[in-house]
Image (cartoon, rainbow, N blue to C red):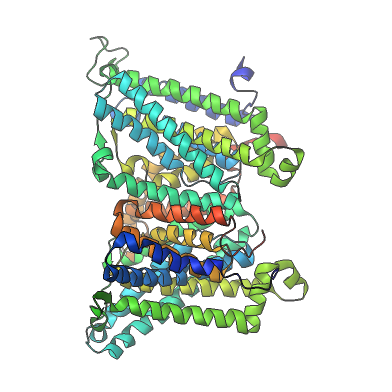
């Protein structure tokens, strides 16, 4: 830590953006609906992006194949939830959770296991060579996407929300979809867990230290390679979880969804500063809000608005809002 | 003389030289050696891809930066021709307007993206170009009034280049002398000129600086070269050449849509060709493009045979289905990055250097 005072400026960005667009949207209830939707989307994106940014910060590995774990998680969820039709069609909320929760766990486990293999066979041979990493992980992504097509077929599959999670609640005039509230809650739980692990445990201390200065941690006798494998697996698992939530959010899953979300995630981790979890949260929320606002105001430029957002942030802080990794 | 034309960058391997001469001769006389529309189409596609891949190699192989927006510039070139001819009719002026417009747009976009992302670090460039390219793809398929949306645009080229235009009643050596033939040779000459200019660029002092930046950015900066300026110039040059390749494609197909020029699959193909042919060796573009485009058509046939042979094992059959050819290309890609980092050209050169 160069300066011990907490850097609060990036935190203001999220409310600032929300307040700034209020006059353009006009009606406060629409604004509230869009804001909640944006926050929900942001939380899901954060879950996916957190793993990627840690992997980059810790090991300088840029994984272009991260998106494949998103698609994998979503497809596993279709199988698990498809097998539990009785529970998903029930109108009681707890019964729905009994279906969704195992789907999330299985998706995380499968994505984590595949992540282990991905790290071993795709990423490990090309440590320290950026050019090859980008090429290889991109190749890995293609292979993964095609394998998903082999297993689940190339068509898109419906992933309907369980009964009790559909519909919306009224908050004043604003209709807020129940599922979005739930994804905000799940996102907060994941963020709190991550923050606790990173901030209050020894492993977290080592990860943060490794992100800042890998060689120093190694010279103190810790096997950072093994730690890195763990982070990679957890990151892949989180991407799987995010994939389940993204699939439920969109209600359909396609083999190409990973590649589509990948673009958003890259924008997020660039905004956040490569290697920074807190930055990734802010970036994800900004991107989620921006996507929903522009989707309402000017749908055709939705993707460009995120790029404009990124350019704006980079003009302000060229290394992202919280620069961590000094390489 | 030959040294001057090839900018003193000789193949440096007898096998490679033989292969190149063979390929160039085959491309030059395709209409006369291989009759039929399909062979001519494949040959024209090879010509387009040689320019496209060579321009990408300038960026990836010589400057060492990865861009995923190369097909965006390719698409801009193709759309420039398509949009201009549908609006202004099939005249030469329309082609000129379309070409210059798309070149200007490519220049501006490459400059902006390059200045923003190459300033910080090269890895940003890969991510930002991916984002920009996917945004552009979405935009192109949504702006229905201009680009024709998902359906794309079909248009007519100037009379003299169209198949219905006949130069003489008599066929020459069994080939009818029509506008299509002229169009092919227009592409051929353009491809040769563009390729030789790229070869000239990478062997100029400017190209040497690019290679120095690729090898050691810090040292190049320390010697006194402005790394950002060189990288951005390289990105712009490569974008302009990709744009010209796109114009060639549109001229040949007389059609352009998001899938033919902008799609991510084409980007993958280009990456694969560069890696197979050999990064940082302009000749790799020729060898790679020819090999790949032949493989692309035959791999699917081969898979179909394999799939039928393995029909007793459903899962193996599913893996070998012709629709899954991208899977095998992906495997091929990963394996060639591991074991063939210097590609076909690099291997051949290394072999003759040993002898």
Q: Nearer the viewer, residue B61 or A176?
A: A176
Residue B287 visible in image = no
Pick the front one: A34 or B223 = A34
Give the residue at x 41% y 69%: A42
Query: Which corner quadrant holds the C terminus of chain B?
Result: top right
Residue A244 point in image, percent of width and height? 37, 73
Residue at the spot x=46%, y=82% of the render?
A189
Q: Could one spot residue B67 in this view of the protein?
A: yes
x and y percent of residue A102 in the render? 37, 84
Q: Is residue A193 above or below residue B240?
A: below
Q: Position of residue A57 (x, y in %)?
A: 61, 65
Give the residue drawn at x 59%, y 49%.
B122
Residue A286 x, y percent position in the rendering: 44, 64
User: Measured along the vertical axis of the image, is residue A75 above or below residue B130?
Assistant: below
Q: Residue at x 48, y 55 (%)?
A: A310
User: Which quadrant of the rendered structure holds the N terminus of chain B?
Assistant: top right
Q: From the viewer's perspective, is residue B6 above or below residue A143?
A: above
- Quadrant for residue A176, please give it: bottom left
Q: State the count of labels.
A: 0
Residue A86 image-quadrant placement: bottom left
Where is residue A3, by image quadrant? bottom right
Residues B92 and B26: in front is B92
Relative side of B259 to B188, left or right: left
């Amino acid at each position: 830590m160069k300066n011990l005072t907490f850097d609060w400026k990036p935190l203001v960005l999220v409310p600032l953006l929300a307040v700034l667009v209020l006059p353009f949207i006009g009606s406060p209830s629409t604004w509230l609906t869009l804001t909640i939707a944006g926050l929900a989307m942001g939380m899901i994106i954060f879950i996916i992006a957190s793993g990627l940014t840690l992997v980059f910060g810790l090991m300088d590995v840029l994984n272009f194949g991260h998106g494949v774990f998103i698609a994998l998680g979503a497809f596993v969820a279709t199988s698990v939830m498809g097998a539990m039709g009785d529970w998903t069609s029930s109108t009681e909320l707890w019964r729905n959770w009994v279906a969704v929760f195992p789907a999330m766990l299985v998706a995380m486990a499968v994505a984590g296991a595949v992540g282990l293999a991905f790290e071993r066979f795709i990423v490990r041979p090309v440590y320290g060579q950026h050019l090859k990493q980008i090429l290889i992980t991109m190749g890995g992504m293609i292979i993964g996407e095609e394998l998903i097509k082999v297993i689940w077929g190339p068509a898109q599959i419906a992933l309907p929300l369980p009964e009790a999670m559909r519909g919306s609640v009224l908050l004043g005039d604003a209709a807020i979809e129940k599922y979005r509230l739930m994804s905000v809650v799940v996102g907060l739980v994941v963020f709190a867990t991550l923050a606790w692990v990173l901030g209050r445990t020894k492993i977290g201390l080592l990860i943060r230290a490794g992100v800042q200065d890998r060689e120093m941690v190694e010279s103190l006798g810790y096997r950072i390679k093994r730690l890195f494998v763990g982070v990679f697996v957890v990151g892949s698992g989180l991407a799987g979880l995010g994939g389940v939530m993204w699939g439920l959010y969109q209600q359909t899953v396609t083999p190409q969804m990973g590649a589509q979300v990948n673009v958003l995630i890259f924008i997020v981790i660039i905004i956040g500063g490569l290697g920074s979890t807190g930055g990734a949260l802010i970036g994800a929320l900004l991107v989620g809000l921006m996507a929903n606002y522009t989707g309402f105001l000017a749908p055709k430029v939705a993707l460009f608005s995120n790029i404009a957002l990124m350019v704006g942030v980079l003009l302000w802080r060229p290394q992202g809002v919280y620069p961590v990794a000094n390489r | 003389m030959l040294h001057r034309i090839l900018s003193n960058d000789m193949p440096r391997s007898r096998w490679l030289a033989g292969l190149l001469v063979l390929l160039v001769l085959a491309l030059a006389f395709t209409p006369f050696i291989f009759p039929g529309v399909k062979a001519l189409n494949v040959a024209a596609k090879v010509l387009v891809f040689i320019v496209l891949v060579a321009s990408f190699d300038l960026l990836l192989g010589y400057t060492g930066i990865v861009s995923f927006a190369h097909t965006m510039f390719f698409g801009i070139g193709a759309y420039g021709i398509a949009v201009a001819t549908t609006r202004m009719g099939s005249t030469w002026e329309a082609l000129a307007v379309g070409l210059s417009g798309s070149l200007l747009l490519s220049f501006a976009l490459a400059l902006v993206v390059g200045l923003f992302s190459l300033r910080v670090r090269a890895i940003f460039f890969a991510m930002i170009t991916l984002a920009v390219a996917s945004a552009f793809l979405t935009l192109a398929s949504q702006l229905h009034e201009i680009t024709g949306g998902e359906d794309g645009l079909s248009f007519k080229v100037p009379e003299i280049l169209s198949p219905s235009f006949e130069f003489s009643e008599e066929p020459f050596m069994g080939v009818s002398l029509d506008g299509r033939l002229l169009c092919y040779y227009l592409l051929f000459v353009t491809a040769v000129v563009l390729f030789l200019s790229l070869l000239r660029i990478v062997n100029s002092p400017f190209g040497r600086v690019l290679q120095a930046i690729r090898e050691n950015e810090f040292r190049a900066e320390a010697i006194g070269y402005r790394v950002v300026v060189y990288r951005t110039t390289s990105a712009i040059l490569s974008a302009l050449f990709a744009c010209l390749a796109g114009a060639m494609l549109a001229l040949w197909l007389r059609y352009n849509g998001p899938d033919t020029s902008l799609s991510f699959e084409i980007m993958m193909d280009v990456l694969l060709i560069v890696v197979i042919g050999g990064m940082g060796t302009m000749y790799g573009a020729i060898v790679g493009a020819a090999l790949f485009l032949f493989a692309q058509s035959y791999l699917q046939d081969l898979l179909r045979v394999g799939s039928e042979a393995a029909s007793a094992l459903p899962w193996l059959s599913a893996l070998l289905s012709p629709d899954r050819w991208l899977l095998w290309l992906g495997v091929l890609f990963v394996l060639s990055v591991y074991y063939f980092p210097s590609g076909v050209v690099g291997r051949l050169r290394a072999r003759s250097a040993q002898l």
